Image (spheres, rainbow, N blue to C red):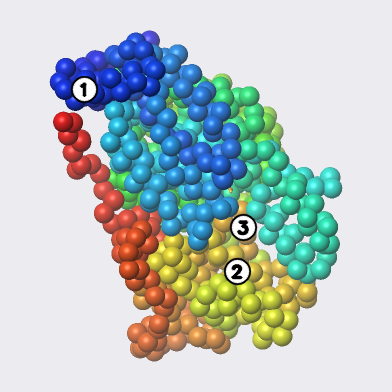
Amino acid sequence: MTARKKTLADLRSQRWFGATDLRSFGHRSRMLQMGYEREDFSDKPVIGIINTWSDINPCHQHFKARVEHVKRGVWQAGGFPIELPALSLSENFVKPTTMLYRNFLAMEVEELLRQHPVDGAVLMGGCDKTTPGTVMGAISMDLPFVYLPAGPMMRGHFGGTILGSGSDVWKYYAEKEAGTITTQQWNDMEAGIARSAGTCMTMGTASTMTSITEAMGLSLPGAASIPAADADHPRMAGACGRRIVEMVWEDLKPSDIIDRRSIDNALVVHNALAGSTNAMIHLVAMAGRAGFPVKLTEFDDFAQKVPVICNLRPSGQYLMEDFHIAGGIRALMLNLAPLLHLDARSVTGGTVGDGLAGIKVFNDDVIRPLDKPIVSLGGTAILYGNLAPDGCVIKPPAADPRFLNHTGPALVFDDYDAMSAAVNDLDLDVTPDHILVLRNAGPVGGPGMPEWGMLPLPKKLLRQGIRDMLRISDARMSGTSYGACILHVSPESAVGGPLAAVRNGDLITVNVAERKIHLHVDDAEIAARVKAFKGPDRAYPRGYNRLFAQHVRQAHEGADFDFLEGKGGIPEPEIH
Ligand code: FES
């Protein structure tokens, strides 16, 4: 039995249902209108279930059924569940990019929880931005919550070959462009790469974010690695429903769970996974909502002490289903125990360490011991220099080593369409030593910082057998991507960052060991070129785009809205 800190009278929802005034008559009568019995909703914690299901989100296709499993758990524990649909943010279909709407979802979740008679919440997300979006909003609202990840989809396959989401698309697209696979083979892959509901099954952004959210203590132990189609998944959904009711009585809020130890644990797990570069934006934003600023350099610092021990694509060999069978996220954290704060708190009411009791690693090729990593140290590097005064990001293990210390001439593109046309031109004046530069792809310029950072290689070079080049942009890159891609250049060109100054043929030096990125143009000339630069017109006359362009922060600051940062300060709604 849970240790209750709250009485019925303390419940937030009692402001709606527990009074005897005219307005509460309306609340109760309208619940009865929906066919509920008084016993259903009276004298119970009300649990809001934030459901990011939609008809056009294949990663959350099972949420219509899964929300019923959460509700079952809530009923079992003596709560009253209400489903609150929220923005679905399907990574595949939302244009120009889901990142434009992550903060929209965060606002929506915070306000959904604030405006309704809710005492606690289960957040259902998984497809990339839905994890940070829902978690950021719920942290800001600071009601008890549990995060339920969608879980990864089954492994893909084609002609006897196992296919991983994203990574194998990039790989085989390059082969198609090089003419080494047929259109029929490409079409067969299209039908075999995504075989069930669930999120991408490589260690892309989705599984990176669900894993680090669990590492922060915000999911029940083991939730992040359970495949969507596994019968364990509905059981986990039910467990979330039961647990959140207890959390309401215990008054266990995110502000009681998240502290600097939780953030450190997220950084450790992120590095051990060789996690998506997108986490460097999302974790900064999530931690910022909890009042714990994270600097970009911390990702580099942790990369110097945490080896990559999770052997999953795109950095390794296996897929999420293999990871789950090998013991999953808890087994990974068990191997990381010497580096984790095991005394950090969890939604279980206990510690992160408690959640690892009795766990074993069943395949130490998938989940390596610390002394047999797939990359010893340095999975992430943060570079600074006159081209990126506020930093930029590279994953050195994902790059051809010759580009880790490279000087070459820039080939610059101002927009994605121009770049796409140019790379298809077999007469393009480009060599393998060129450095491809794409600008106007940051938070304001994109807008929304699209995942364009793995710039496509010129067809001419692909046909010569070239499979990597140094690429620099103020964009993000999919967590399933790879290559010598320097991302998140901050500040971005659209707000006067020096990427705006680069011209074709300018020499750029990248030296990862020294953490440097340098444009060989003098400071006065850079300043003059930046001043003369005409970026895209992002002065929208109205609407969400206008709000976004005016308030979004830069990548190194988490790309949150300036008016959403910080904690608390918003009064409860008046009920009249
Ligand atoms: Fe949804 Fe990859 S498209 S997780």
Instruction: Indicate the amino acid at tag 2.
Output: Leu
Q: Pointer 2: what residue?
A: 455
Q: Horizontal placement of 116 versus 358: left or right?
A: left
How far across and how far down the image is residue 210, in percent?
51, 40
Q: Secondary structure at mark 1?
A: helix
Residue displayed at 51% across by 70% down: 473
Q: Nearer the viewer, residue 264 or 539?
A: 539
Q: Nearer the viewer, residue 378 or 263?
A: 263
Where's residue 266, x and y in %? 45, 42
Q: Tell me, yes or no, whether the two marked residues, 1 and 2, touch with CB atoms within 8 Å.
A: no
Residue 45 image position (x, y, % from top left) = 32, 20
Query: What amino acid is labelled 1 in the image?
Result: Ser
Q: Quadrant of the N terminus?
A: top left
Question: Considering only vertical position in the picture, is 164 above or below 116?
Answer: below
Query: Residue 130 appears at what percent x and percent y?
Result: 47, 44
Asked if the residue under mark 3 is in contact with the one under mark 2, i.e. CB atoms within 8 Å, the reply is no
Estimate how packed mark 1 is, as few (under 14), some (14 to 19) or many (20 or more) residues with alpha carbons within 10 Å: some
For residue 189, above or below residue 325: below
Please tell me which residue is depicted at 62% across the width and 59% down the height of the picture. 482
The residue identified by callout 1 is: 24
Q: Earlier in the sequence, mark 1 or mark 2?
A: 1
Q: Disc 3 versus disc 1: distance between alpha carbons? A: 53 Å
- Asked if one can make out residue 240 in the rendered structure from this viewpoint, the answer is yes
Q: What's the mark number on residue 481?
A: 3
Instruction: Give the residue type at disc 3.
Output: Ser
Q: Is residue 207 visible?
A: no
Q: Within 8 Å of ligand 1, the CB of disc 1?
A: no
Position of the C terminus, as image quadrant, is: top left
